[in-house]
Image: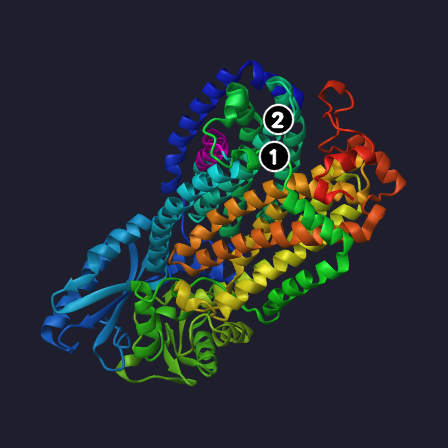
Amino acid sequence: MLRRIADLTHRRARLVLLFSLLAAVGLGAIGLGAFGQLKGGGFDDPDSPSSRAAAVIDDTFQGEDNLVLLVRAEGGELAAPAVQKAGTELTKGLKSQPGVTRVASYWAPGGSALTSRDHTQALVLAHVDQEDAQEVKKITDKWTGDRGAISVRAGGGAALNEQVNAQVSKDLAVAEGIAVPLTLILLTIAFGSVVAALVPLAIGLVAILGTFAELYVIGGVTDVSVFAVNLTTALGLGLGIDYGLLLVSRFRERLGAGDEVHAALRTTVRTAGRTILFSAATVIAALAALLLFPPFFLRSFAYAGIGVVLIAALSALFIVPALLAALGHRVNRGRLPWADAVRKPDAPLWGRVAGTVMRRPVLTALPVLAALLLAAAPLLGASFGSPDERVLPENAESRQVAAALQHDFAGNESAAIPVVTEGRAADGAVAAYARKISRLEGVVRVRAATGTYAEGRPLREPGGATPAGYSEQGVHRLDVTTGVTPASDRAQDLVHEIRDVPGPGTGTLVGGRDAALVDSKASIGDKLPAAIAWVVGSTFVLLFLFTGSIVQPLRALVLNGISLTAAIGAMVWVFQDGHLSSLLGFTAMPMDTSMTVLMFCIVFGLSMDYEVFVTSRVKELHDAGASDREAVVGGLSHTGRIVTMAAGLLAVSFFAFVTGNVSFIQMFGLGSGLAILIDAVAVRGVLVPAAMRLLGRAAWYAPGPLRKLHAKAGLSESGGAADDPAEQPAEPAGPAGAEERLPASTSV
C-alpha cells in the first residue's frame, strides 16, 4: 500500500496537490461554521444526581439561578427613591428579556434577603439559556454598567462561561500569533532551507482546517466544547511538524545517499510512512480513552484529537510525498549558511550521549531518574476540583462579583444548593426535611414552599419571606444557603451530608455547583481505571505489533509513566501550590480534574509518538544485524535530531498558551510542553539507552507463539521490504557494517 502511495504521488504529483488544495479550501469554508456550534462548560456528568436535579429544576421550576447581577447603590443607600426606581426597572426589564426564564430580585416580593450586610448592594438572580454564549453576552451587555443611581456587574455560571470563552478566544489568537511565526523561524533554522521548512506547515494547516470541518459536523449532532479549538491548533501544528520532519529528513537523507527522486520517495514513504501510521495509531489509542468519560468537555477533545491525528497522517502520506516529488532536489532551495550541517542524516551529539549512557547505564540514569521522581513528588499532595471564577484574572467582572458575594453577603444566595424532591411530597414532610437540613453546620437558611428555616426553626422576620416558585404540582424545590466557600472541601462535605438526610416522598436530588463538582470527580474517578487500562492495553498491543517484543512495550510504558508523572507533579507544584503565580498571573487552586486527565492522555500519546520514531530506527538497525549497543547508538544518532527538533517545536505551540489569562489553559500548555521536552531529552536521550543496555538481548524477547503471531500480523518500519529488494536501503547487513554506519566518535 505504501509503495502504491509513493508511486501515485510521484506520477500524479500535481493532480494530488491540486485536489489537496481544493479540499483544504472546502474544509476551511465548512470549518468556519464550527465556531457557532461549539459550547462552553461541559464539565458535568449528564447522568449524575446533580444533572438530574438540574433537569427537574429546568422542567419544573424554570431553571437554576445562573446569572447574578450585583447592584450597587451609587449614593450608598438602597432605600433611596432613585435606587428603588432603578432597581425595580432593572428587575422588570430582565423579566421581559427573551431567554430569561426565572428572576428573583431584592426589588421583588420575598427578596429582602438579597442584600449585603451594609445594605449598599443587592442582587438580582436569573436563569438564562447558556447554550448560546453570544445571547448571554447580549443580555449582560444590555443590563450591566452604569445605570444612573445604580451600577450593575454580571457574575454567576452563565456570565463566567461567556467570559471564559471570550478570554480563551483572545488568548488563542495571541498564542497563534506567537507560535506560528516562531515555529516557521525555528523550522527554517532546523532544516537549513526555507522550502523544506514550509512542508510541515502544509500538513498542519490541512489538519487544522479539516478538524474544524469535522467539529462542525459533530457539533450538529452532539455537544462539543469550545476548548477543543485549542487542542486542534496545537496538535495539528505539532503533528504536522513531527510527520513533516520525519518525511523530509528521510527524503533528504536518501537524496544525499545518491538515490534518484523516485527511489528516494519510495524508500521515504515505505519507511517513514510506516512509522507515521504506527505513531498515529498510538496517539489515537491514547485519545480514544477520553471517550469513556461522561462529561462532553473531555469527549470533545477525543473528537478533535482523533480527527486531527487522522487528517495529519493522511496529509503526511499523500500531500508531503506529492510536494517532495514536485520539488525533487529543489527541496533544499533557500539554503542557509548552516544547511550542510543540519542536512547530515546523523547527529553525532546524540550518538555520543547514547554511547556514554550505554557504557555506564546505572551511573548516568540514576540522577535523571531521581530528578524525575522528585518532580513527581507533589502529586502525593494533589487535590482536584473544577474550574470556577478563579481561573480568570482578578480584574474579571465575574470574579469580582464572586468575591463580593463571598465577603459582603451573609450567605451566598447565588451559590445556594438546590434540592428537589423526586415526585410528589407532602408539605408537612418537606417542612420537617427543611428543618433537618437547616441544622447542618455551615447552613445559613433553607427556603422551601412551606417557609424559610434556620437552625431548625422557621424564620418570622421579613427576611424570611419565601418567594413563589418553590412548589409545582406536589414537586418541591428547596434552596440551601450556606456560609461556606463554594467548591471548598467543606462545601463538598456539606453536599454529602445533605444527601445523607432522608428526604420526603421517594427521595431528593441535590444539585448546584458544589454537587456537580462532587459528581464530576466521582464520575471521572470511576472511569479512570478503565481509561488507563485501555491506554496501557492498546499501546502494548500496537508496540508489540511494531517491534515483535513484549519487553519493549513494557519498557516504553514504564518510562513514559515516569516522565508523565514528573510533568503533572510539576504542575501541582506550580498551579496548586502557587509557585510562579506572580510570574504567570494566576491564582493557586486545586488541579482541574478534567484538564489533568486530558493532559495525561494527550501527552501519553505524543510520548509514544516519539517512542515509535526512535524504536523504528533502532529496530531497523537491529534487524540489519547490528548488535544491541550498535543499534541503539545508531538509532539515537539518526533520530535524535528529529525527535528533539520535533519536541522543541511542538513545545513552542503548547508553551504559547501560557501567555493566556485562563489558568487551566495555562496549566495545560505549560504541563504538555514540559512533558514533551522531558520525554524527548531525559527519556529518549538517557533512560531509553540505559534501559536497553541493561536489558540487553532480553529487550527483544517474545514467547514462541507470539513470535509466530508477529511474523504473520506484525509490521515494522523495515517490514515488508523483503518482497521488494530494490527498495532495501543501501546499508550493510552485518554488525561490522553497522559499526561503519555509526559516527566515528560513537562506534562501539
Q: Is residue 300 above or below residue 265?
A: below
- Lower position in the chain sequence, tag 1 or tag 2: 2
Instruction: Report, in whole angstroms, how far the alpha carbon at label 1 lies from the one at label 2.
Output: 8 Å
Residue 531 in the image, given as x and y percentages of width and height = 64, 52
What's drawn in magenta, residue-wise? 193-213
Q: Which residue appears at 42% of the width and 47% of the height? A: 226
Q: Which mark is residue 205?
A: none
Task: Tell me the residue that label 2 is attached to.
Answer: 256
Residues marked 1 and 2 touching at CB (< 8 Å): yes
Q: Is residue 82 above or below residue 49?
A: below
For the point 48% across and 46% down, which residue is it?
231
Q: Is residue 317 visible?
A: yes
Q: Indicate the position of residue 20 as horizontal and vertical percent values.
A: 47, 23
Please identify the quarter of the rendering in which residue 65 is found: bottom left
**Horizontal relation, residue 94 to residue 665: left or right:** left
- Other residues around mark 2 within 10 Å, as few (<14) / some (14–19) / many (≥20): some
Whether residue 290 sits left or right of residue 216 in the image: it is right
**Percent from the top left, x then y, of residue 131?**
37, 49
Quadrant that contains the N terminus? top right
